[in-house]
Amino acid sequence: MIFKDYYRILELETNRVNVDEIRQAYRELAKKYHPDVNTADQFSEDRFKDINEAYRVLSNPSSKRKYDRMWHNYVGKKKRKEFEESRRNSDSPFSDFFDMFFGNIREEKKEAPKKKEPMIKGDNVETEMNVSIEEAFYGVQKKLSLRTVEGNLKTFLVEVPAGIRNHEKLRLIAQGKEGKNGGKNGDLFIKINVQNDEKFALDGFNINTNLYLTPWEAALGTRVKIASIDDEVSVYVPEGIQSGEKIRIPQKGYKDGKGGRGDLVADVKIAVPKQLTEAEKKLFEQMEQISKFDPRK
């Protein structure tokens, strides 16, 4: 078995060389002795195989240390030769020397890096919450309980801002379904449903209400007080007002989000007493006799 002087093969005079120097020597010689360049020279093909073999051993820090121990013993006993060739099978790029001492390098396989799973953001969750018109106007803090996919009950404290619009959505960041592979959680979206009541109904930025008048108030005109959502206002009712007509009170409606407010719109409804006193009945009978008003004409 002939000892292979890999440093000599790479035309390096010493083993005190770093990886970059080994790589540079390999590139120059591989280019020089490549079989495609030296098609008629059988020696060049063998030399090219030895160059690759030498680089395979010396570019690996572990195998280089192992080789250097043998190399020191060899150069201390024998004179270095210009070039030494050991036997190899005709179809093998590696010599017997390489197979005996460094065959494990050829068998080493770099473990393919595990494919990193893509980060997946969790799904958003949508739900609804009902609030009264007063709660929407002033703002409110309410609890919301939802059932998770595991079947557990999760409770959220939801801050409903003052002046929120009907069907507007609140967003709770990262309170939706969990992400996968380190992805962010989804968000929780809560659609707010503003519930009208017997007194008030929301219409955009306006608030509608009913104004009930007696027949004589409607006929003679009057001044009445109307309750708005946050106070009470006095309005003048003109004489002869009819059911279905509207009285509009500016800036007493819902918040418009710009520091102002819509209008309070009072829908006039003339109410007739279901039970009359004798005196009231006589007055209505007198009105029937003297009045020429016919609402059907």
Image: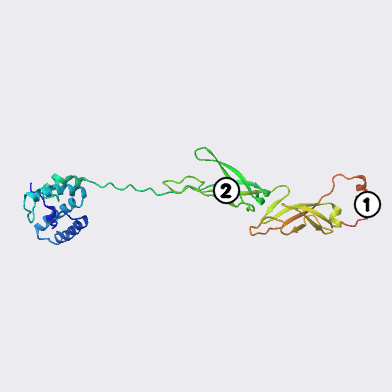
User: Which colour scheme appears in the figure?
Assistant: rainbow
- Classify the position of the C terminus by image quarter: bottom right
Which residue position holds label 1? Answer: 286
Tell which of 216 and 230 is nearer to you.
230
Packing grade of label 2 (10 A; few <14, some 14-19, many >=20) is many
Q: Is residue 257 above or below residue 146?
A: below
Q: Secondary structure at mark 1?
A: helix
Q: Position of residue 5 (x, y in %)?
A: 11, 52
Q: Name the residue located 14 percent from the left edge and 45 percent from the top edge.
A: 101
117 relative position to 193: left or right: left
127 relative position to 59: left or right: right
Inspect this view and state whether residue 295 appears: no
Which residue position holds label 2? Answer: 190
Quadrant assignment, res 33: bottom left
Q: Amino acid at mark 1?
A: Gln
Residue 211: image tag: none
Q: Secondary structure at mark 2?
A: strand
Q: Position of residue 15 (x, y in %)?
A: 15, 53
Q: Position of residue 213 (x, y in %)?
A: 82, 52
95 relative position to 172: left or right: left
Which label lies toward us, 2 or 1?
Answer: 2
Do callouts 2 and 1 mark residues in contact (Cβ within 8 Å)? no
Packing grade of label 1 (10 A; few <14, some 14-19, many >=20) is few
Q: Amino acid at mark 2?
A: Ile
Q: Name the residue located 93 percent from the left edge and 55 percent from the top edge.
A: 290
